[in-house]
Amino acid sequence: MNWYWLYGVRLASSEPLACLHQADPGQPDVTITFYDAATGAAWDQGDSRWPPDAAERGVRVRLNGQQQRYEFDYRDGTRFRVGIHGDLISALTPAGAILEDTVIYLVGPVMGFVLRLRGVVSLHASTVLIDNKAVCLCGGPGAGKSSTAAAMALRGYPILTEDVAPLSDGGGSFSVRPGYPRVNLWADSSSALFGAPEILPVITPNWEKRYVPLKTRFWEQTAPLAAVYVLTERHGGQDAIIRDRPPTENFVGLVANTYVNYLLDPAMRAREFDVLSRLVRAVRVRSVSPPADIGRIGALCDALVADVNNALRCTA
């Protein structure tokens, strides 16, 4: 087996996973077994019908009560089977794909759902460390989470998470668990930050995204959460606009920016509401409207650092 840490979980994998942070052997929290088109031929085909929302998302997820598992079937043929306790995963890489393609789903929605099964709420956020405190940058696809995190890494700030920010709930305080030592970028962000996309390696030959290897800029430990910034619509000015919002608006904004929130059962939803209602009272939550010009991302970084440092001085 191969051993890794991911989102505070010790993962035992049947295959080496180059993108993950290695762990010492020990009792695994989650065991994953990979299959390919040859070794996975015996997988059941199941129901071929897709509900409309699954077709829109490109994935169908269902509970197989008889087998005591959740089943993820992606349009491209990638498939996962997740035990109902979140401790076992089987993954099928279809013909024409490679292991790295499957791992993209694993480190994102599949592990995001496993965390839910284990009682962990995750923000859809990249997380940077400022003055030894975790700062989450929330937002939907294209909001600029990863671009901002990469820009902060270039300025010397350690990164905890890319896209998935798992929250450790301390009751009256929160912290963020580390993810994996990469930040993934689309071509336009790669060009803006590094001059040309080709400077960065691709996450897999079958995907367009590239990644920034964090190396010494990856923070390997859970860090206390100091602030959450929700990236909103961009504007035509030169500087980032950071605003306070009422607690109710912050709560709604965070509900919209939790990870895999389309897969929640009533118990998971109740857990999420409880966690987020306490988070908006315990942690600084503000909205950020970045400049539309990605060349001004440095101004956004400056504004975030100044705002966080000001908040930390006020609470010291």
Image (cartoon, grey):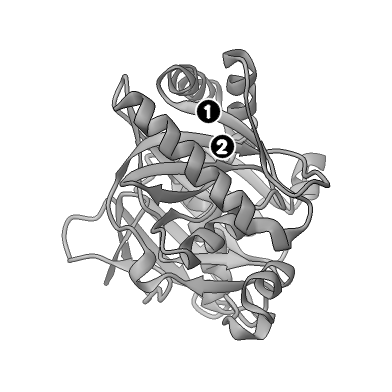
Q: Mark 1 — residue?
A: 285
Image point (80%, 43%), residue name: 235
Residue at image coords 35%, 46%: 177
- Check disc 1 and give the amino acid type: Val
Within 10 angstroms of label 1, few (less than 14), some, or many (20 or more) residues?
A: many
Up-down relation of residue 197 to residue 304 (above or below): below
Where residue 146 appears, as percent x and y from the top left, is 59, 57
The outermost residue toward the bottom is 198
Residue 127 shown left or right of residue 315 in the figure:
right
Query: What is the count of numbered marks?
Result: 2
Where residue 159 appears, x then y in whole percent? 42, 57
Compare residues 65 and 261 and report the one nearer the observer: 261
What kind of element bears circle 1? strand
Q: Which residue is label 2 attached to?
A: 229
Quarter of the image for residue 269 reads top right
Residue type, label 2: Tyr
Q: Nearer the viewer, residue 118 or 49?
A: 118
Marks 2 and 1, how far apart at CA: 6 Å
**Reading the chain from its start, which is encountered first: label 2 or label 1?**
2
In this rendering, the answer to whether 194 lies above or below 122 is below
The answer to whether the residue labelled 2 contacts the one labelled 1, judged by CB atoms less than 8 Å apart, is yes
